[in-house]
Image (cartoon, rainbow, N blue to C red):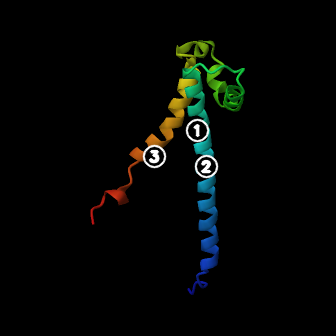
Amino acid sequence: MILPPFSPTKRGGEVLRSQLALEVALAAYSLIAALMLLRLLFKLSCVSAFVWSGQVVYRLTDPLLFPFAAVQVAQRPLLGAATLADLTGIGLVSLIPIILLIRNDPSAATDP
């Protein structure tokens, strides 16, 4: 059976879309991680929600922490003004790179 000729243009388009999706996902993750870290720093330094910068950061990150803040116990301050919900959010954001670092990649383990 004779197969149709290989078309490199189709394959190149798929790789380009995949790379674009990866870069968009990485940019979104880094934005969320930076906002969560900024929120934790603001909470540790007791920046009020009445200050414009605190109001902006808290307003942007409140929807991200809503599932954790819905539990009454998560509203108790642990470090400065940082609550359990804030610390849980930072923990989840930091888990993603840790999981990617410890993933087993057999091709990287072979010595040349």
Q: Are marks 3 and 1 in contact (CB under 8 Å)?
A: no
- Label 3 and label 1: CA atoms lie apart by 18 Å
- In this picture, is 75 found above or below 64? above
Residue underneath mark 3: 100
Disc 1 element: helix
Marks 1/2 in contact by CB < 8 Å: the verdict is no
Amino acid type for the residue under numbered disc 2: Ala
- Choose the circle earlier in sequence order: 1 or 2: 2
Residue in the image at 61% along x and 39% along y:
32
Q: Mark on residue 27? A: 2
Which disc is residue 34 wearing?
A: 1
Q: Residues within 10 Å of mark 1 (few under 14, many from 20)?
A: some
Could you tell me which residue is drawn at 30 percent across and 61 percent down? 110
Residue 76 picture location, percent across and down: 58, 12
User: Which residue sits at x=62%, y=42%?
Assistant: 31
The residue tagged with tag 2: helix, strand or loop?
helix
Q: Is residue 101 left or right of residue 42?
A: left
